[in-house]
């Protein structure tokens, strides 16, 4: 079983919104597709994440534990993405500062090895 990032996002959004319909609107996907995704995730996990009520959903006890871990995983993924963007910006800046004025438009893949020497890969 491999939980997908989209499934984490969907389950966290449903838990925060308290309604599948409202979460589907927020995620800009169809409500039946979201319901099916959550049901598939629950089947893969082997336990229910949500208790369904006529006017919404609440997390089960297991769902609460999963919710905390899913939030942490999404936050870690966002942090990794931010770090990658920062590193890419730094690499472009290092490249530009090491190049001649005529080559100010260079990007990391076309920089000379000497301009990349101090940049993490």
Image: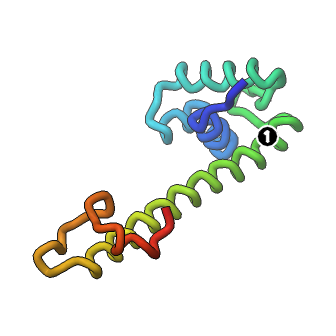
In the picture, measured across the screen, residue 111 lies left or right of residue 36, that is left
Crowdedness of circle 1 by 10 Å Cα count: few (<14), some, many (20+)? some
User: Which residue occupies 75% across, 26% down?
Assistant: 52
Snapshot quadrant of residue 34: top right
In the picture, measured across the screen, residue 96 lies left or right of residue 7, that is left
User: What colour scheme has been applied to the protein in the rendered image?
Assistant: rainbow
User: Which residue occupies 77% across, 30% down?
Assistant: 50
Instruction: Report which residue position mark 1 lands on.
Output: 66
The quarter of the image holding the N terminus is top right
User: Which residue occupies 81% across, 36% down?
Assistant: 63
Residue 6: percent from the left, percent from the top? Answer: 57, 35
Residue 97: percent from the left, percent from the top? Answer: 28, 81
Q: Is residue 19 visible?
A: no
Residue farthest to the right? 61
Helix, strand or loop at disc 1?
Answer: helix
Snapshot quadrant of residue 58: top right
In the picture, measured across the screen, residue 58 lies left or right of residue 40, that is right
Taking 110 as reference, is 24 above or below it? Answer: above
Looking at the picture, tell me which residue is in the foreground, 25 or 75: 75
User: Which residue occupies 35% across, 73% down?
Assistant: 114
Residue 22: percent from the left, percent from the top? Answer: 55, 37
Residue 77: percent from the left, percent from the top? Answer: 59, 51
In the picture, measured across the screen, residue 84 lies left or right of residue 54, that is left
Q: Is residue 102 visible?
A: yes
Taking 98 as reference, is 81 above or below it? Answer: above
Taking 68 as reference, is 51 above or below it? Answer: above
Q: Number of numbered discs present?
A: 1
């Amino acid at each position: 079983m491999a939980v997908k990032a989209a499934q984490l996002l969907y389950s966290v959004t449903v838990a925060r919104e308290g309604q599948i319909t409202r979460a589907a609107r927020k995620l800009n996907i169809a409500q039946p597709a979201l319901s099916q995704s959550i049901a598939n995730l629950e089947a893969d996990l082997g336990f229910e994440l949500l208790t369904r009520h006529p006017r919404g959903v609440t997390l089960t006890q297991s769902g609460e534990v999963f919710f905390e871990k899913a939030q942490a995983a999404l936050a870690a993924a966002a942090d990794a993405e931010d770090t990658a963007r920062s590193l890419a910006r730094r690499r472009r800046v290092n490249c530009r500062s090491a190049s001649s004025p005529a080559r100010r438009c260079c990007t990391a893949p076309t920089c000379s090895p000497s301009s990349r020497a101090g940049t993490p890969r």
